[in-house]
Image (cartoon, helix red, strand yellow):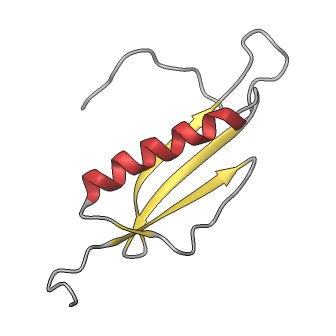
Amino acid sequence: MRSLFPMPRYFFHVQGARPFHDDGGLDLPGDPVAWAEAKRFVRGIEVSLEPGETWQLEVHRDGQAIYSLKLCTRAIGSSDRGGECEDAVVGSQRP
């Protein structure tokens, strides 16, 4: 039996050192669950991170990006400034 209210499909695309284009996606009950899945996905990336790399995960629903997480790594004090890294801001800023 098909659901009267199908779940939206979310796609998780990675850009950076090891790009990945999600062709299958995941059916999830809503944006908050997709955000939780994105954070879980990023924890899986951490084992591959190297200083000087920048990764970006975008979560798409209905062909539009709804979330973006960017990981930027660098070795402080080295000549490698980490490519696209900007100075880190400690703490939380809210509008």
20 up-or-down from 48: above or below: below
**Residue 31 picture location, percent across and down:** 27, 57
Camera-side residue of 63 and 50: 50
Kindly give the residue lying farthest to the bottom in the view shown: 1
Q: How many marks?
A: 0
Give the quarter of the figure containing the N terminus: bottom left
Residue 77, by quadrant, is: top right
**Residue 74 picture location, percent across and down:** 71, 23
Give the quarter of the figure containing the C terminus: top left
Camera-side residue of 51 and 34: 34
Kindly give the residue lying farthest to the left in the view shown: 4
Q: What residue is rendered at 66% in x and 60% in y? A: 20
**In this rendering, would 11 be left or right of 1?**
right
**Residue 22 picture location, percent across and down:** 57, 68
Q: What residue is rendered at 44% in x and 15% in y? A: 90
Camera-side residue of 69 and 84: 69
Residue 73, by quadrant, is: top right
Q: What residue is rendered at 23% in x and 80% in y? A: 6
**In this rendering, would 18 be left or right of 91?**
right
Camera-side residue of 20 and 2: 2
**Residue 8 picture location, percent across and down:** 30, 73
Kindly give the residue lying farthest to the right in the view shown: 79
Q: What residue is rendered at 75% in x and 30% in y? A: 50
68 up-or-down from 11: above or below: above
